[in-house]
Amino acid sequence: MLMGLFDRFRRTGMRRPDGNAARTGSTTVRASDAADEQHLRNFVTTRRGVEGFVEPRTAVSDVTLLLVAHDGEWTRRRVPSVQWAHNFANKHQVPSYDAAVVGIPQRMRDWNKRQKEGRN
């Protein structure tokens, strides 16, 4: 079979030695684990005014739960699913929102700015 100059660069035709199509542009993301859950639990039990923002899976990150305290201090960890994140928040009496819909709170950005400027 004759191969044209650009045929060798066409992604649809690429095959791995095992015969399966090569996956280009995909990334492997670390799954959430018990340490992630423990970190989130610690954050909600040691801060006040915590709200949860569930961030959907992206090309480079799995589903994450962003927790933001009353003063803007925040933490983010991978979670098993969107439903798991909302259930976690409900269990800990933390309001939860879909970050893709509501965005992230201004107090978080303000906290980041204060940290960068060296003011706590």
Image (tube, helix red, strand yellow):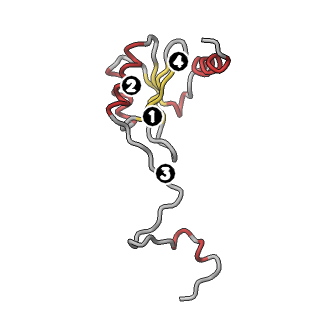
Within the image, what quadrant is residue 80 found in?
Answer: top left
Mark seen at residue 64: 1
Secondary structure under badge 4?
loop
Quadrant in which residue 50 is drawn: top left
The mark nearer the N terminus, 1 or 4, is 1
Instruction: Find disc 2 in the rendering and name its residue.
Output: 39
CA distance for labels 1 and 2: 13 Å
The reply to whether callout 1 and callout 2 are in contact (CB within 8 Å) is: no
Which badge, 4 or 3, is on the more N-terminal residue? 3
- Which residue occupies 65% across, 80% down? 5
Give the mark nearest the N terminus, 2 or 4.
2
Q: CA distance from mark 4 to mark 3?
A: 29 Å
Residue located beneath label 4 in the image: 73
The residue at 58%/76% (across/down) is 8
Which amino acid, mark 1? Thr
Within 10 Å of disc 4 (Cα), the crowding (few <14, some 14-19, many 20+) is some
Which sits in the foreground, 116 or 68? 116
Tell me residue 47's x, y (percent).
Answer: 44, 13
Of marks 1 and 4, the one in the foreground: 4
Badge number at residue 34: none
Label 2 CA crowd tier, 10 Å (few <14, some 14–19, many 20+): few
Question: In 3D space, how far apart are the residues under numbered discs 1 and 4 (Cα atoms)?
Answer: 16 Å
Amino acid type, mark 3: Thr
Q: Which mark is residue 27?
A: 3
